[in-house]
Image (cartoon, rainbow, N blue to C red):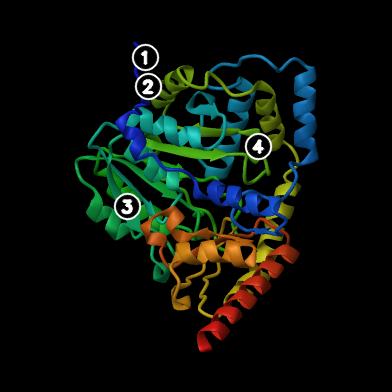
């Protein structure tokens, strides 16, 4: 008898796991480019700067010096010490290297934290719109989703009153992100202090995603990690991708209570084993070396924001707040008459501009697009020109 046809059967949680839509749109844009189209890329959240030279040199030197082998799962002592020094200085709290866990990228800190904490039915509070992997991982683990809608009229800050109302005995994790992707909003000191008081009365932990904390244009970054009584229940998630233009290096870290760091390290030992040795030495150079490249990059992002957001506001049907941090513009496009996904697709196909639908970041993103300012000023202005011309064609066609 012939063998029975094999039918692949995935585990049930795989039906709910999501993706980052930016990579999907990037793929479609690359396909159009392969057909000879010219596409302006405003979809991907990747600094358009080279990794600073002294960081590259540190990696070359580390490879020549033999940093090409396994490392401890929690990371090399040199980088754990450098991260501890950096976070202690930036957050004004003592940090021990034993509380630092080095990982290959930013996402593993989120992934490992949730694997170590979340059981089916536990509640996870997170921003909507927000980084899509927050919801994807919570859903994958069978958590009860408790999104907090970010509202334009509040500057896209999380409404602390809504978080307080959502807290329950089953709340296991609260995810924060400030400066925020995709909106560029930031939490105030008062927001952080009020939330710390509310969380103190619960058994919940907090994961604060601070990957954009060096990219601030207005005000100051305030972290719940620095609040009294929060160190023992907070995981600080950060990395090198955004501030040091090291997206392809896959290097990040979490700072967390010592006992939790041990648990997360066990998860790493069963998954990625460790982070590449020579990239970790590059991370030491990034944190302890010249910070001028970071300042120059942030200054250029600010210049693009200041020049381009007013132009976006001149587009018919667009309304855009000035982002306080990160490197995104998040215009309201409801008055265009298109849904976010429709406008994303048509701008790509018909105008040659790759942007992201706000719904790529959750239902709360309906009526918005995300433009990444991680492209040259010339290209961003060209993209706005293309969008203006496309909108004019739609208006003209509608009048006929």
Position above or below: 262 against 202: above
> Alpha-carbon neighbours of circle 3 within 10 Å: few (<14), some, or many (≥20)?
many
- Foreground: disc 2 or disc 4: 2
Instruction: Indicate left or right for 99 with 285 as reference.
Output: left
Identify which residue, 400 or 43, lies in the foreground.
400
Q: Alpha carbon of mark 2 to alpha carbon of mark 3: how far?
A: 39 Å
- Say if mark 2 contacts mark 1, CB within 8 Å: yes
Picture disc at residue 147: 3
* 309 is higher (above) or lower (below) than 170: below
Q: Residue at x 72, y 33 (%)?
A: 285
Q: Is residue 51 left or right of residue 238?
A: right
Q: Which residue is mark 2?
A: 6
* Residue 184 appears in the figure: no
Question: Which quarter of the figure is the N terminus placed in?
Answer: top left
Question: Is 160 rendered above or below residue 331?
Answer: above
Cβ–Cβ below 8 Å for labels 2 and 3? no
Q: Give the residue furthest to the left.
A: 169
Percent across and percent down for residue 165 are 23, 55
Distance between mark 4 and mark 1 Cα atoms: 44 Å
First reached walking from the N terminus: tag 3 or tag 4 = 3
To which residue does mark 4 refer? 248
Q: Residues within 10 Å of mark 1 (few under 14, many from 20)?
A: few
Place residue 115 in its image quadrant.
top left
Tell us which disc is closer to us: 3 or 1: 1
Mark sitting earlier along the chain (2/4): 2
- Number of residue marks: 4
* Residue 3, numbered label: 1
The residue mark sitting in front, 2 or 3, is: 2
Q: Are marks 3 and 1 in contact (CB under 8 Å)?
A: no
The secondary structure type at the circle numbered 3 is strand
């Amino acid at each position: 008898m012939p063998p029975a046809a094999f039918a692949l059967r995935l585990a049930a949680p795989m039906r709910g796991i999501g993706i980052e839509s930016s990579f999907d749109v990037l793929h479609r844009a690359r396909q159009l480019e392969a057909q000879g189209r010219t596409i302006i890329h405003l979809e991907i959240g990747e600094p358009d700067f080279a990794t600073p030279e002294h960081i590259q040199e540190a990696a070359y030197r580390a490879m020549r010096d033999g940093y090409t082998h396994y490392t401890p799962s929690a990371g090399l002592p040199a980088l754990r010490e450098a991260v501890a020094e950096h976070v202690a200085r930036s957050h004004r709290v003592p940090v021990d290297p034993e509380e630092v866990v080095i990982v290959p990228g930013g996402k593993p800190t989120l992934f490992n934290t949730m694997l170590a904490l979340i059981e089916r039915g536990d509640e996870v509070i997170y921003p909507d719109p927000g980084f899509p992997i927050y919801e994807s991982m919570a859903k994958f683990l069978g958590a009860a989703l408790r999104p907090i809608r970010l509202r334009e009229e509040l500057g896209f800050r999380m409404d602390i009153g809504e978080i307080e109302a959502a807290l329950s005995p089953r709340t296991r994790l609260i995810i924060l992100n400030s400066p925020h992707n995709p909106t560029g909003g930031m939490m105030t000191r008062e927001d952080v202090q009020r939330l710390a008081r509310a969380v103190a009365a619960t058994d919940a932990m907090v994961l604060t995603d601070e990957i954009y904390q060096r990219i601030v244009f207005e005000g100051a970054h305030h972290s719940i990690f620095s609040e009294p009584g929060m160190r023992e229940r907070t995981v600080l998630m950060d990395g090198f991708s955004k501030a040091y233009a090291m997206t392809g290096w896959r290097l990040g870290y979490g700072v967390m209570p010592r006992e939790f760091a041990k648990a997360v390290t066990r998860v790493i030992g069963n998954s990625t084993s460790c982070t590449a040795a020579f990239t970790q030495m590059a991370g030491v150079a990034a944190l302890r070396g010249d910070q001028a490249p970071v300042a120059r990059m942030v200054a250029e992002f600010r210049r693009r924001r200041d020049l381009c957001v007013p132009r976006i506001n001149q587009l018919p049907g667009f309304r855009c707040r000035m982002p306080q941090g990160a490197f995104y513009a998040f215009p309201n496009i409801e008055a265009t008459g298109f849904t976010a996904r429709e406008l994303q697709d048509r701008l790509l196909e018909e105008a040659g501009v790759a942007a992201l639908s706000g719904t790529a970041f959750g239902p709360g993103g309906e009526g918005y697009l995300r433009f990444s300012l991680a492209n040259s000023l010339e290209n961003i202005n060209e993209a706005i020109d293309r969008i203006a011309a496309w909108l004019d064609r739609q208006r003209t066609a509608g009048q006929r």
